[in-house]
Image (cartoon, rainbow, N blue to C red):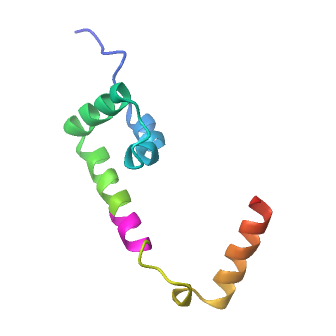
Amino acid sequence: MLLDRRAIACQEMVELVSDYLEGALNRGERRRFERHLAACPHCSEYLAQMRETIRLTGRLVPEDFTPQIRAEFGELFRRWR
């Protein structure tokens, strides 16, 4: 049995999921990604969880966070910039 050297491993899927969701993968990478999804229920579930996380976090408003969390996020943002 020959190995498909172009196949994506689960670890690579985790690294590519953001690019996939943002539409940033080229056609070949997207096909490889989707081929892996079709055969891997674990990665399919991970993608579903990521989509749900994005859906839910899109509903957050500042009032959802405690003052401490808002301060921590502000500090993280200032250090990042």
Residue 4 coordinates in the image, percent (x, y) = 30, 15
Left or right side of 81 for 66: left
Q: Give percent across and percent down for residue 68.
A: 68, 86
Which residue occupies 40% across, 30% down?
26
* Quadrant in which the N terminus appears: top left
Q: Is residue 55 magenta?
A: yes
7 relative position to 72: left or right: left
| Picture residue at 64% right of the left edge, 82% below the top | 69
| Rendering quarter of residue 55 | bottom left
Q: Quadrant of residue 78?
A: bottom right
Which quarter of the image is occupied by the C terminus? bottom right
Does 34 lie within the magenta span? Answer: no
- Residue 7 percent location from the top left of the image: 33, 23
What secondary structure predominates along the stretch shown in magenta? helix
Choose between 50 and 43: the one closer to the eye: 50
Which residue is at 36% across, 19% downward? 6
Q: Nearer the viewer, residue 22 or 50?
A: 22
In this orientation, which residue lies closer to the viewer: 14 or 59? Answer: 59
- In this rendering, the count of numbered labels is 0
At horizontal 44% and vertical 37% (from top left) the residue drawn is 11
Relative horizontal placement of residue 40, taking residue 7 as reference (left or right) = left
Compared with 18, 75 (above or below) is below
Tell me where the magenta segment starts and ends, as one range.
Answer: 52-57
Q: Is residue 43 above or below residue 59?
A: above
Q: Residue furthest top?
A: 2
